[in-house]
Amino acid sequence: MIVANWKMNPATYAAAERLTAAVKKIPAGRTEVVICPPLVWLTDFSHKESEIKFGAQDIFWENPTGPFTGQVSAQMLTEAKVKYVIIGHSERRILVGETDAMVNKKMRAAALARLKPILCVGEDRAVRRQGLAAAKKFVAGQLKKDLVGIGRAYPLIVAYEPIWAIGGGKADTPTTAAEMAWYIKKLRPRARVLYGGSVNSQNARNFLQLKEIDGALVGGASLKPAEFEKIITAANQ
Ligand code: PGA
């Protein structure tokens, strides 16, 4: 599974349309490809395009309607043929102060509405400096809090994204990412685990060939069709 997180990009509708058209041309093979454009264009594309699966980058926890200025509900997204939603991305946790309690409410709202949540977890640099055991403990704590009320049988998608690796910096090592994926699956045996954090056409294969890793959440590289195509090719190998 390869998920494109466009974040707050590109700058114009025309560019977003070109990007969507380019992704549509990439042979997906046996890979599940999901693109998550900014909300302002998402539902326009999801209504029009049936060949690509779409995801939102966030939702609100109340559903389906109500006095919640600026928010969008899970039901509004499913009605617009959106199938997935990224929840708890570190940029939301850090920049808009999203807590584990909020992430949990969003997870529950998505699951109830049959929107497939992609839950993002991952430690920051200070935690990783203390070692992998500390990072595992941190991630286990996030999962515990974020998944209150979500049963162990729920077919979860977790994106392990060490915060320090996000944003075109240095990716984690594939072996460490695989070890974390294995650890997450021990806690949640039905989870699919994606790796995210500076995945590009050069390193994608190193992550995706490992059996513990079921896919990637791709930020920057998903905005370049040629790069993104190589990542999907790597997933199919
Ligand atoms: P990146 O972003 O691929 O640009 O590091 C990944 C993410 O934040 O999901």
Image: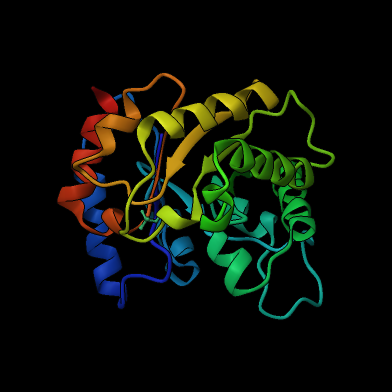
Residue drawn 79% across the image and 54% down it: 105
- Residue located at (72% from left, 81% from top): 69
Instruction: Using the rendered image of the protein, determine whether residue 99 is visible from the camera's viewpoint.
Output: yes
Q: Could you say where residue 62 lies in the image, as x and y percent from the top left? A: 79, 62
* Residue 150 picture location, percent across and down: 78, 36
Count the numbered circles shown: 0
On screen, residue 107 above or below 12: above
Among the 4 quarters of the image, the one containing residue 6: bottom left
**Residue 123 in the image, given as x and y percentages of width and height:** 57, 50
Which residue is at a point 63% across and 74% down the rendered structure image? 96
Assign ligand 1 to one image quadrant. Answer: bottom left
Q: Is residue 82 visible?
A: no
The quadrant holding residue 141 is: top right
Describe residue 92's horizontal placement relative to residue 111 as left or right.
left
Q: Residue at x 49, y 47 (%)?
A: 161
Q: Nearer the viewer, residue 131 or 20?
A: 131
Left or right of 9, for residue 223: left
